[in-house]
Image (cartoon, rainbow, N blue to C red):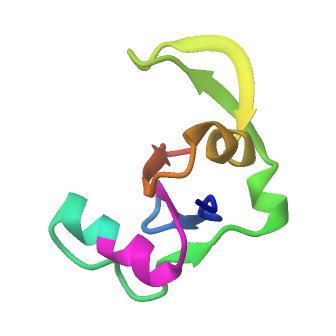
Amino acid sequence: MKDKKLKAYQCDDSDVYAAESAEQASKLYEEMVGELPEDGYPQELTEKALDVQYPEFDENENKTGAMTSIRQMLAEHGNKSGWLCGSEW
């Protein structure tokens, strides 16, 4: 079975979803939030945006002291579509 190629889509000011398409990202957002994304969303992240470095947090939302990127989060996420990250960076 071929792995799905997931991309990162920003669906509001802070939430990013791993999805195969903008339509799928919109549907995932609607399922989680209860409403469709605002006009202009979802937006596929650019190559440059995928590589921006951000502080890494653990499952308890504590800083680990390491840095990460959305590209790295997407790679570690696996091949299941869904919420990837969110923050008021």
**In the image, residue 48 above or below residue 65:** below
Towards the viewer: 63 or 82: 82
Say which quarter of the image contains residue 49: bottom right
Quarter of the image where the C terminus is located: top right
Q: Position of residue 82 (x, y in %)?
A: 40, 54
Say which quarter of the image contains residue 48: bottom right
What residue is at 58 percent from the left and 60 percent from the top? Answer: 1
Tell me the magenta residue range.
Answer: 14-27
Towards the viewer: 38 or 17: 17
What residue is at 47 percent from the left and 58 percent from the top? Answer: 17
Q: Position of residue 45 (x, y in %)?
A: 68, 67
Answer left or right for 14 relative to 31.
right
**In the image, residue 28 above or below residue 59:** below
Q: Residue furthest front?
A: 1
Q: Position of residue 36 (x, y in %)?
A: 26, 79
Towards the viewer: 82 or 67: 82
Number of dots carrying numbers: 0
What residue is at 76 percent from the left and 69 percent from the top? Answer: 46
Answer left or right for 10 relative to 74.
left
Q: Residue furthest bottom?
A: 39
Answer left or right for 44 relative to 51.
left
The verdict on residue 15 being magenta is yes
The verdict on residue 9 being magenta is no
What residue is at 43 percent from the left and 20 percent from the top? Answer: 61
